[in-house]
Image (tube, rainbow, N blue to C red):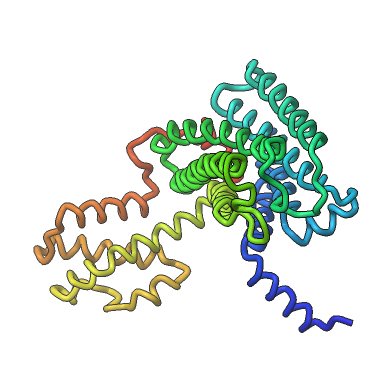
Amino acid sequence: MMTFLDAVAAVLRWLVESPVDAITIVVATVASVSVLRKKMRERRSMLPSGVLLWSAACILQIHVVYDFIDPLLGGSNVTNLLYRILVTAALGCLEVMVIRATKGRGTPWEALVAAVVVAMIALQTLIFAVNSWPVTDTYLSEDGGEIGRELFWNVMPLCIGVFSVHVILTVGAEWRAHSVRATRWGLALIGFAAALDLLWLVENLATSTYRVLADSRFFLGPNGDVVGALLVGTMIACTGLGVAVGSAERLVDHLWMRLLLIRATPTWHRVIKSAPELTLTGSTGLASSLLTLEVEHVLYRRWKEMLDCERAGKFTPTDAERGLLEEIGRTLSGSPAETPDREHAGLSGLLTAGRAS
C-alpha cells in the first residue's frame, strides 16, 4: 500500500519528468477558473465555452490521462481524434467570440465559422478513419511519413493558424488603444501566444514535408517533436496567463508599482545622498520595500522626495528620469494614458469582464 510519502515522491518525480504536463494542468485550471466567474458568464460570451473546451483538450494530451482514457476507447488513439475535435470546437467558439467583440452579434460570419468548424471536424474524422493507428501514443509519434497521416496531423494546426492570424490582427488594432494596464498585458500575452501558434504551424508543415519526401522518422520516435512540444507548451502558458492577467487589474498594478520602485531606487538613493534632510524614511533597503504589502506608499514617498529635491535645487532630472517621474505620477493617480479607454470594445471588453466593479 502506497504511503503518503510515496505519493508525494511519485508526484515530485512526475513533475521533474513531465514539466510540460505540469504546466498544462496549472494553466488550464487557472484559465478555466478565471472564465467561470459570474461576471464572465453574465456577458454570455463564447469565451468560457472556448476556454473550457480548450482546457479539456489540453488535459487529454497529458500522458497519464491519455494512457488511461485511450484503452477505454479501444486503444486506437481515438483520444487523439477527440483532442483535435475539442480544439477545433474551442477555436470555433473563440473565433465567434472575437467576431462578436469586433463586429457585433448576428453577423453572417458566425454561420460561416460554424460551417467551417463542422467541415474541419468531419475532415479530421474521415482522415483518421481511413488511416490505421495501431500503437497507443499521445502524440502519435510512432506513426508518420505517410501522406494521409501527415494530413491528419496538420488539419488542426491549419485551423489554429487561421485563428491566430485573426487574433494577431485584433490585438494589434487594440493593444495601443487601451489604457488599462492589466488588459494591455493580457492582450500582449495572447498576441504572443498567437505568434507562437503560427510558428508551430510552420514547423509542423516543414517537418511533415520532410518526413514525406526524405526521412519518415524525422522528429518521431521516443523523443517525438521536441521543438513542437516546446512551442505548444509555451503557447499554452502564455494563453492561460493572458486570460488570467487580463482581468487581474489590482494584481498587475501592484506588480507594476514594484517594477517602478526597482527602476526609481538607484536614482532615489543618489538624490537623497545630496539632501538627506528631505527623506522621511532614510535609506530603506529595496528588498524590504518590495516585500511590503503597501508598496504604493513606499513608491509615493520616494517620488515625493525626489520632487522635493528637484524643487530645492538638489536634483536636475534627465529626460529619462523625468519620464520615469511622470510615469510614477500617472500610476499613483490612476490617470490613464493619453489614449481612449476601450474597456467595452473588442477583446479588451472580454478580458475586463471579470474585473471587480
- The correct choice, above or below, for 45 with respect to 229 in the image is above
- Furthest toward the left, the residue is 313
Residue 34 visible within the image: yes
Which quadrant of the structure image shows residue 316? bottom left
Camera-side residue of 58 and 95: 58
Camera-side residue of 96 and 131: 131
Residue that appears at 19% across and 63% down: 308
- The correct choice, above or below, for 273 with respect to 322 in the image is below
Q: In which quarter of the image is the N terminus?
A: bottom right
Camera-side residue of 16 and 78: 78
Which quadrant of the structure image shows residue 109? top right
Using residue 295 as the reference point, say whether residue 11 is left or right of it: right
Residue that appears at 60% across and 44% down: 211
Residue 304 percent across, percent down from the top left: 26, 62
Residue 228 percent across, percent down from the top left: 57, 51
Residue that appears at 38% across and 65% down: 297
Residue 356 visible within the image: no
Q: In which quarter of the image is the C terminus?
A: top right
Residue 180 percent across, percent down from the top left: 45, 43
Residue 177 percent across, percent down from the top left: 40, 34
- The correct choice, above or below, for 9 with respect to 28 in the image is below
- Furthest toward the top, the residue is 108
- Furthest toward the front, the residue is 214
Residue that appears at 36% across and 68% down: 298
Q: How many marks?
A: 0
Which quadrant of the structure image shows residue 292? bottom left
- The correct choice, above or below, for 6 with respect to 103 in the image is below
